[in-house]
Amino acid sequence: MRSPTDPASAPNTAGTPLPSRDNAALAALAPWPDPQANKYTRGKLSLVAGAAAYPGAACLAGAAAERAGAGYTEVFCAGESLLAVRSFRPSLVARDWREWHPARQEARCADRTGACVIGCGFDGDARQRELVAETVRAATGPVLIDGGAIGLMADKAGQRLARERAERGVGPLVLTPHGGEAARLARGAELEGALGGPELAVGLARAYRALIVLKGPITFIADAEGIVETMGRGTAALAKAGTGDVLAGIIGALLAQGLAPRDAAALGCALHAEAGRAAAQELTEICVSAEDVIAALPQAVRAIVGAH
Ligand SMILES: NC(=O)C1=CN([C@@H]2O[C@H](COP(=O)(O)OP(=O)(O)OC[C@H]3O[C@@H](n4cnc5c(N)ncnc54)[C@H](OP(=O)(O)O)[C@@H]3O)[C@@H](O)[C@H]2O)[C@@H](O)CC1
Ligand SMILES: Nc1ncnc2c1ncn2[C@@H]1O[C@H](COP(=O)(O)OP(=O)(O)O)[C@@H](O)[C@H]1O
């Protein structure tokens, strides 16, 4: 795993946000492929997503992950969603989520980088609860929890699962809540007080022992040490259904390519915001949809990371 590029020299225990990283700092993180790369060495993303009611979330996260550089993106989804995922993007390897066995998966790929994103398009049934618990327990690589899986972690049992994982010292956990999901996580952990953005992000990071990406017009990235980074370069064009699934796919792909969690979150949020702005420039803030954000990712890569 790459070492974290930390703009702070000391932990910021008060949770006061640090300035956003500039393009030069972000460009240094870019996962350009090695000339000898193959699809497996470039990072395998296992995306567990897409209940029968929400195949679109799996499609969006999977397509975004491919655009963000993952070498092999496998989508484990409900049987009813398989056709939608395959038809949306044939390069995605779509499997029934009954085939998702995180412990076996990790053992097969011990010498490769990889990551798991779980929850885009979950709607919270008992099977999905089991998938989340099994993944948090057994996956040894980085795990990003998004969408409906966040609600499944938002109670004492979920908090215990997350903390036990942190104590075992296996792969890191990243949670990417929007405001509503963050409120659920706070209630689940019985966090008290009407906390504002950065304080809430740090409170959740400590309660769940995870990196928190608290999304909104300004996004706060916080860890349990109390270090907070901000991302405010987005646009209201991003306030459309599915753009959070796109962000989960991007950050998941960067984790799968070996970036440390805070670096993956900082670069991922910057690329997402920049892609939103590029799409809005072409299509207006009114017309942009989540698919357009994915399509604009190459422009965002050029603007932030430059050519290789
Ligand atoms: N194409 C697809 O397949 C798509 C599938 N998707 C998938 O759908 C699943 C459900 O996800 P979801 O976000 O739509 O609903 P949910 O988690 O129930 O929360 C909504 C409630 O929270 C509140 N709220 C407060 N602050 C908020 C904020 N800043 N941003 C948003 N909400 C905020 C607000 O409550 P209110 O303030 O109205 O009381 C609101 O009613 C999930 O798995 C996701 O991946 C979507 O990604 C869309 C595209
Ligand atoms: N007004 C805004 N300005 C900038 N970014 C925004 C704004 N509204 C939403 N976003 C961004 O769009 C994304 C929305 O995520 P989320 O609410 O999880 O969407 P969904 O669940 O529909 O996929 C987040 O990355 C958030 O930061």
Image (cartoon, rainbow, N blue to C red):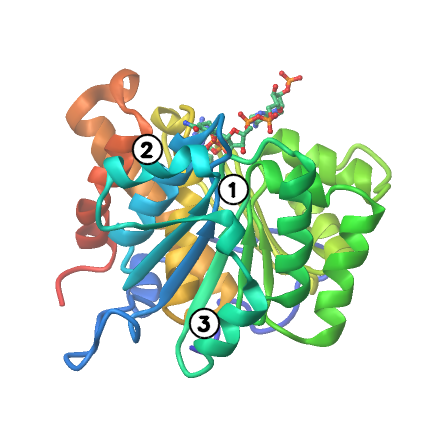
Residue at which label 3 appears: 5
Query: Do we see residue 253 in this rendering?
Result: yes
For the residues marked 1 and 2, what is the alpha-carbon distance in whole angstroms? 31 Å
Disc nearer the start of the sequence (2/3): 3
> In the drawing, does residue 180 fall left or right of residue 21?
right
Residue at image point 63% right, 72% down: 10
The quarter in which the C terminus is drawn is bottom left
- Judge the density around disc 3: few (<14), some (14-19), many (≥20) Cα neighbours within 10 Å: some
Residue at image point 49% right, 69% down: 105
- Judge the density around disc 1: few (<14), some (14-19), many (≥20) Cα neighbours within 10 Å: many
> In the drawing, does residue 137 fall left or right of residue 28?
right
226 or 189, nearer to the observer: 189
For the residues marked 2 and 3, what is the alpha-carbon distance in whole angstroms? 38 Å
For the residues marked 1 and 3, what is the alpha-carbon distance in whole angstroms? 19 Å
The quarter in which the N terminus is drawn is bottom left
> In the drawing, does residue 207 fall left or right of residue 78?
right
Task: Residue 239: name its quadrant.
Answer: top left
> In the drawing, does residue 79 fall left or right of residue 187?
left
Residue at image point 42% right, 77% down: 2
* Vertical comparison of 121 with 143: above or below: above
Query: What SS does tag 1 mark?
Result: strand
Query: What SS does tag 2 mark?
Result: helix
Beta carbon at label 1 within 8 Å of ligand 2: yes
* Vertical comparison of 66 with 128: above or below: below
Residue at which label 2 appears: 84
Disc nearer the start of the sequence (1/2): 2
Query: Do we see residue 271 in this rendering?
Result: no
Q: Amino acid at mark 1?
A: Thr
Residue at which label 1 appears: 219
* Vertical comparison of 58 with 94: above or below: above
149 or 307, nearer to the observer: 149
Q: Please tell me in which quarter of the rendered image ligand 1 is found.
A: top right
